Image (cartoon, rainbow, N blue to C red):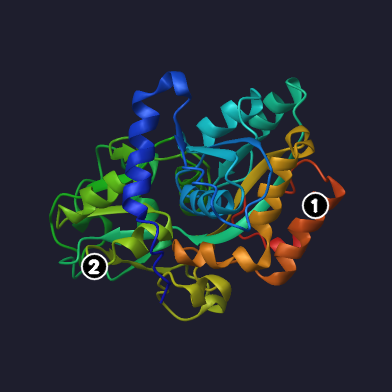
């Protein structure tokens, strides 16, 4: 069971961030974390600003880190926007941000945009996530779904044709499906379509899409025949309102039958293919500024990994964190994921 962060309400933070992003175009969609009153006797004299944008999935971790970092560094202003992984990379490769939150690796086209702008970056995994498929609590038939059934439901060919649960599985009720999922700028959308369909971005278009995961939570919560997917933290925060679906990937080596998302099933690699690493990307030039370097070091420090758990995600292994810290120390730029896919990839082997 995850710790509950007393100073953070996930729903409140993300809803506020989405609101700010939608009405404050001039401000670049940023949410500013208060830098505190400066009365902490352990506070440093570090000054400056750290600009961050990107994934709504990674947002809760980065926001928690920013809040705690600013308690010790009240003269540093950390802003965290939520424009989705794709939107975040657009700003990052235009030089508008120092750090980009990403729920998938950078795509080749995005890497080319960064290269064209002479922006070098360091890729850092920061946590594990479990993309969670969720249904209404009164759904009694979809306790378990196979990857093939998810493909039948979500593939592009399903649009306008697969409209009832019974068409997915003859044992399911003959009731209309209400589909909810992240928008196309979301890294979670990219990962899910890659894992289920085998082709990133290939999905039916006739579903309710939103970059605000709380909108998806509310949609599934309000319809007995709904189904949706998003990062584990949003399920964990709302598990009294939603039910997680067990996933059967058809691979006997991952255990028999269905596996539900949890700390144990993510870390032992049995929740497949929907377990994934999530990232931050740091502009190498920005690391020359002491406030940015200090924030990144804070983010990866062992004593701060508790915040990953507190917002509902899973810390990496010590080996992977150590390799991430080495990437910073060595200034190692670029991505270890050519093509931008992490499906089936083991971090400790590629870092």
Looking at this view, is 91 or 166 the one in front?
91
- Residue 10 lies left or right of residue 220; in this view the side is right
All told, the count of numbered labels is: 2
Residue 92 is tagged as none
List x then y, in percent, for residue 321: 71, 63
Could you tell me which residue is drawn at 73 percent across and 21 percent down?
117
Residue 58 visible at all: yes
Could you tell me which residue is drawn at 21 percent across and 46 percent down?
163
Could you tell me which residue is drawn at 55 percent across and 52 percent down?
71
Q: Residue furthest right?
A: 330
Image quadrant holding the C terminus, namely bottom right
Kind of element beneath mark 2: loop
Cβ–Cβ under 8 Å for marks 1 and 2: no
List x then y, in percent, for residue 57: 46, 49
Which quadrant of the view contains residue 231? Answer: bottom left
Circle 1 is placed at which residue position? 327
Dot 2: few (<14), some (14–19), or many (≥20) neighbours within 10 Å? Answer: few
Image quadrant holding the N terminus, namely bottom left
**Relative height, residue 272 to residue 253 (above, below):** above
Looking at this view, is 339 or 125 the one in front?
125
Could you tell me which residue is drawn at 15 percent across and 53 percent down?
223
Which quadrant of the view contains residue 98? Answer: top right
List x then y, in percent, for residue 64: 50, 54
**Relative height, residue 42 to residue 243 (above, below):** above
Q: Residue furthest top?
A: 26
- Residue 318 lies left or right of residue 235; in this view the side is right
Q: CA distance from mark 1 to mark 2?
A: 40 Å
Looking at this view, is 24 or 102 the one in front?
24
Circle 2 is placed at which residue position? 240
Kind of element beneath mark 1: helix
Dot 1: few (<14), some (14–19), or many (≥20) neighbours within 10 Å? Answer: some
List x then y, in percent, for residue 103: 54, 48
């Amino acid at each position: 069971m995850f710790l509950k962060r007393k100073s953070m309400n996930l729903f409140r933070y993300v809803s506020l961030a989405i609101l700010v992003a939608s009405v404050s175009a001039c401000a670049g969609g940023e949410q500013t974390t208060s830098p505190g009153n400066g009365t902490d006797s352990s506070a440093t004299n570090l000054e400056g600003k750290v600009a961050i944008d990107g994934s709504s999935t990674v947002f809760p971790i980065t926001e928690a880190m920013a809040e705690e970092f600013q308690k010790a560094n009240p003269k540093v202003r950390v802003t965290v926007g939520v424009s989705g992984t794709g939107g975040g990379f657009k700003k990052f490769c235009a030089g508008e941000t120092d750090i980009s939150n990403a729920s998938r690796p950078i795509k080749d086209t995005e890497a080319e945009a960064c290269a064209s702008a002479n922006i070098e970056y360091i890729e850092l995994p920061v946590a594990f996530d479990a993309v969670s498929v969720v249904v209404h609590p009164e759904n009694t038939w979809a306790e378990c779904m196979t990857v093939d059934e998810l493909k039948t439901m979500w593939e592009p060919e399903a649009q306008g044709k697969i409209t009832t649960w019974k068409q997915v599985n003859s044992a399911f009720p003959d009731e209309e499906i209400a589909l909810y999922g992240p928008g196309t700028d979301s890294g979670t959308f990219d990962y899910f379509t890659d894992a289920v369909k085998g082709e990133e971005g290939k999905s039916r278009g006739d579903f309710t899409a939103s970059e605000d995961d709380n909108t998806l939570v509310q949609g599934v919560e309000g319809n007995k025949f709904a189904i949706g997917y998003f990062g584990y933290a949003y399920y964990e925060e709302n598990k009294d309102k939603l039910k997680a679906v067990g996933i059967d990937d058809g691979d006997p080596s991952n255990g028999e039958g269905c596996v539900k998302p949890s700390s144990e099933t993510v870390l032992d690699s049995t929740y497949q293919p929907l377990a994934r690493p999530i990232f931050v990307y740091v502009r190498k030039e920005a690391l020359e500024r002491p406030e940015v370097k200090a924030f990144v070091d804070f983010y990866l420090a062992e004593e701060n990994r508790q915040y990953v758990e507190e917002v509902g995600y899973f810390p990496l292994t010590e080996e992977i964190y150590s390799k991430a810290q080495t990437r910073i120390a060595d200034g190692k730029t670029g991505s270890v994921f050519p093509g931008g896919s992490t499906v089936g990839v083991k971090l400790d082997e590629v870092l």
